[in-house]
Amino acid sequence: MSTNTTTSPLIVELPRGPSIAGTRITVYSVMDYIKANRSKEEIIESMTISLEQLDAVYEYIEQHREEVERDYAEILRRSEELRERYDKVFWERTPFPPDMPPEELKAALIQRLEEKKRQLLASNGNHGTP
């Protein structure tokens, strides 16, 4: 069943963007799934929304395609910018080289955590240890 967003409150305009009424799910969040070519069934199950709500999102996107596509592209751009900035900060602060293989990095991080745990327990006098 398709809904008419001009008479139905299924999509509401909120400060964070057009959203499914009564949820915190934005049209842009659903677009991530749409752009990833997920089926309607997958989207409904993953986002815990109804078919009626999903159809309202599709209808909203169709009625506001240019604006939605522009805003979605801007959201993706900002997300990538933030990811790059946080990656840079991480690699500036980490003692590990950026080209370290993921398996070695994981093992080294686990080793550091275990070492810190031993130090904490030693400084604690082993109080409260299992």
Image: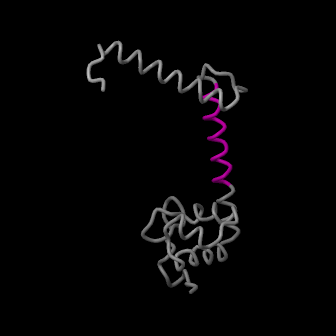
Q: Is residue 74 above or below residue 9?
A: above
Q: The N terminus is located in which quarter?
A: bottom right
Q: Is residue 121 above or below residue 25?
A: above
Query: Is residue 18 shown in magenta?
Result: no
Residue 127 is left or right of residue 98, and the answer is: left
- Most prominent secondary structure in the magenta stretch? helix
Toward the left, the furthest residue is 127
Q: Which region shows up in magenta?
A: 74-91
Q: How is the image coloured?
A: one colour
Pinpoint residue 17: horizontal percent, then vertical percent: 54, 62
Q: Residue at x 48, y 24 (%)?
A: 113
**Callout count:** 0
Pinpoint residue 54: horizontal percent, then vertical percent: 56, 74
Q: Residue at x 55, y 84 (%)?
A: 3
Pinpoint residue 73: horizontal percent, then vertical percent: 69, 56
Toward the front, the furthest residue is 130
Which picture quadrant has residue 67? bottom right
Toward the right, the furthest residue is 99
Pinpoint residue 15: horizontal percent, then vertical percent: 49, 60
Query: Is residue 77 shown in magenta?
Result: yes
Foreground residue among 114 and 52: 114
Q: Residue at x 62, y 41 (%)?
A: 82
Foreground residue among 36 and 130: 130
Q: The C terminus is located in which quarter?
A: top left
Toward the bottom, the furthest residue is 1
Which picture quadrant has residue 23? bottom left
Residue 78 is left or right of residue 6, and the answer is: right
